[in-house]
Image (cartoon, rainbow, N blue to C red):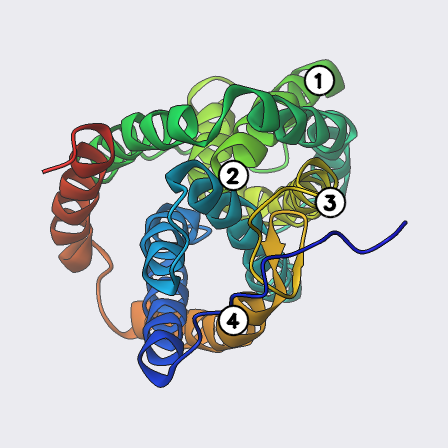
């Protein structure tokens, strides 16, 4: 496979580099502190960052934001899943059962995204942010169910398929979707749902990233060092910084109460979601 033709633009002056560093710090910290994948913050930040780099096609900027976000989440999710596994909260069998459908669904999601266009994705993502904002304001109810109860494999596969599809379409890890489905529909205790979600995100983000590389291969107007809809320059700036600050966020959450940040973050997501739906 030949490397796709690219526009030769990077737009990478010092201010843009600092912008993406800031995005990595913010996204990583929020992901660790609130236990989310970070995509809900990465995608809008990346979208506006690519516009700032000089990409005038808003549809292309959105595709790049989705693909690059998934590539960043590969690194942050590996860090998160490892932490849950070390603490014994992750159930490998449930994760693999969900991954059976999550991987092909994520690949399908990337193919669908390339057909529907970036402007539709931007509106879809804006609507999703409104849902996420609501979820932060009204959290899932706590449960005393047995964390070791056996969940039927077909039900786990269904959760994996839905999560993988939406993850790849939106450029997110899908943690909020997976946790909601596991806890509300399959009655998995919340702490186990969060841990198993982190494991699933590893598989779905890798598949989604791969699908976005394939879907964007040869696209016109890509900045240099882009492989499909994944820009390696931005990824290299943000990914490992985000992974480090995800650990800082997780440590901070253990010392404080995450609820103190949930409502302010929900307000930010609400405003960003409305802006992506209705520019103002």
Badge 2 crowding class, 10 Å Cα cut-off, few under 14, some 14 to 19, many 20 or more, is many
First along the sequence among labels 3 and 2: 2
Whether pointer 4 and pointer 1 mark residues with C-beta atoms closer than 8 Å, the reply is no
- The x, y position of residue 180, in whole percent, is 42, 29
Badge 3 crowding class, 10 Å Cα cut-off, few under 14, some 14 to 19, many 20 or more, is many
- Provide the residue designation for mark 3: 210
Seen in the picture, residue 200 relative to 222 is either above or below; the reply is: above
First along the sequence among labels 4 and 3: 3
* Residue farthest right in this picture: 1
For image coordinates 35% across by 60% down, the residue present is 49
Secondary structure state at the residue bearing disc 1:
loop
Whether pointer 2 and pointer 4 mark residues with C-beta atoms closer than 8 Å, the reply is no
Quarter of the picture containing the C terminus is: top left
- Provide the residue designation for mark 1: 152
Badge 4 crowding class, 10 Å Cα cut-off, few under 14, some 14 to 19, many 20 or more, is many
Secondary structure state at the residue bearing disc 3:
helix
Depth check: give the residue in front, 97 or 206.
206
Q: Is residue 154 left or right of residue 29?
A: right
Depth check: give the residue in front, 159 or 86.
159
Secondary structure state at the residue bearing disc 2:
helix
First along the sequence among labels 2 and 1: 1
Badge 1 crowding class, 10 Å Cα cut-off, few under 14, some 14 to 19, many 20 or more, is few
Q: What separation in Å lies between label 3 and label 1 (alpha carbons)? A: 29 Å
For image coordinates 65% across by 22% down, the residue present is 161
- The x, y position of residue 260, in whole percent, is 14, 58
For the residues carrying marks 2 and 4, which lies nearer the camera in this image? 4
First along the sequence among labels 3 and 1: 1
For image coordinates 61% across by 64% down, the residue present is 224
- Provide the residue designation for mark 4: 243
Q: What separation in Å lies between label 3 and label 2 (alpha carbons)? A: 26 Å
Q: Find residue 130 and report its image quarter.
A: top left
- Provide the residue designation for mark 2: 193
């Amino acid at each position: 496979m030949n490397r796709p033709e690219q526009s030769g633009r990077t737009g990478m002056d010092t201010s843009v580099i600092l912008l993406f560093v800031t995005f990595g710090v913010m996204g990583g910290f929020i992901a660790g502190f609130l236990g989310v994948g970070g995509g809900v913050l990465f995608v809008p930040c990346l979208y506006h960052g690519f516009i700032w780099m000089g990409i005038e096609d808003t549809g292309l900027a959105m595709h790049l934001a989705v693909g690059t976000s998934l590539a960043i989440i590969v690194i942050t999710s590996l860090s998160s899943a490892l932490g849950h596994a070390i603490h014994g909260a992750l159930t490998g069998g449930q994760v693999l059962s969900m991954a059976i459908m999550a991987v092909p669904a994520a690949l399908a999601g990337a193919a669908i995204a390339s057909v529907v266009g970036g402007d539709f994705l931007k509106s879809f993502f804006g609507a999703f942010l409104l849902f996420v904002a609501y979820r932060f304001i009204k959290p899932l109810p706590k449960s005393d169910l047995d964390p070791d109860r056996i969940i039927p494999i077909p039900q786990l596969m269904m959760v994996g398929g839905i999560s993988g599809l939406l993850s790849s379409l939106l450029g997110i890890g899908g943690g909020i979707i997976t946790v909601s489905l596991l806890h509300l529909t399959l009655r998995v205790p919340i702490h186990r749902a969060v841990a198993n979600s982190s494991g699933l995100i590893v598989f779905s983000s890798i598949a989604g990233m791969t699908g976005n590389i394939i879907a964007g291969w040869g696209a016109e107007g890509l900045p240099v060092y882009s492989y499909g809809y994944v820009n390696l320059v931005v990824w290299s700036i943000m990914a490992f910084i985000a992974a480090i600050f995800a650990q800082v966020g997780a440590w901070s959450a253990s010392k404080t109460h995450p609820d103190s940040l949930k409502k302010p973050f929900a307000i930010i997501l609400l405003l960003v979601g409305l802006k992506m739906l209705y520019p103002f």
